[in-house]
Amino acid sequence: MTQVAFLRKADIPTKTEIEGIIKGLGYDFEILEDSENIVELNGISCSINGHETYFEIYFDQPTEITNDCDWIIPDLTNQDTAISFVWGADFAAGACIGLISIALIDKGQALVYYLDDEMKYSREMLVADTPQFLTELDKQKKNNAPNPSVKKTITNGNSENKSFWDKLKDLFK
């Protein structure tokens, strides 16, 4: 998945500015990179509400993006940088990218696009999407967590020695 922010390079906020804007929105957010200047990075490790994630970032000239996405061209005026955020099926990354995009809009008047669906994002849309990402992240975490209410069934005092098929048969007795 790819989301791109177009803005002027001179308006790109620092790591501290990005963190401050996102914390001001009420999120426990931290960029785990040492560099204050995000332009020096090829990827960002960060934490959102205790969930760590990583995603790739690329800095290009806007034409590198608009050559394949000419539907964006009418919106661009003086933006001289395109920041591409690339991630997979990771709800924490999606939330972090959305929040960083909000910071880029607030601090750098960025124009933000989700290329996969040819969609322009407003600040309001990004604000609304973040809780949805975090809800899905929490669901995913709950589904992967061991359930303490599930107890081992011990038949004849020794279920650990039974084969998978024998345990499956016991379920249907």
Image (spheres, rainbow, N blue to C red):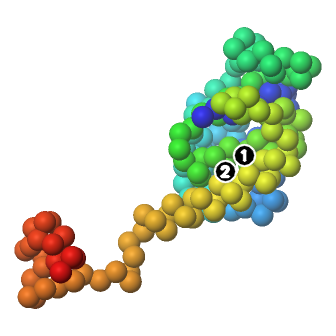
Q: Amino acid at mark 1?
A: Gly
* Residue 121 vs residue 21, the one in the foreground: 121
Q: Are marks 1 and 2 in contact (CB under 8 Å)?
A: yes
* Residue 49 vs residue 131, the one in the foreground: 131
| Label 2 residue SS | helix
Q: Residue at x 8, y 88 (%)?
A: 156
| Label 1 residue SS | helix
Q: Position of residue 104 (x, y in %)?
A: 81, 39
Res 117 → quadrant = top right
Q: Amino acid at mark 2?
A: Ala
Q: Residue at x 78, y 22 (%)?
A: 81
Q: Which residue is mark 1?
A: 98
Q: Which residue is mark 2?
A: 95
Q: Position of residue 145 (x, y in %)?
A: 42, 68
> How far is mark 1 from mark 2, CA to CA?
5 Å
Residue 17's place in the image compared with 75, above or below, is: below
Res 6 → quadrant = top right
The answer to whether residue 21 of the structure is visible from this angle is yes
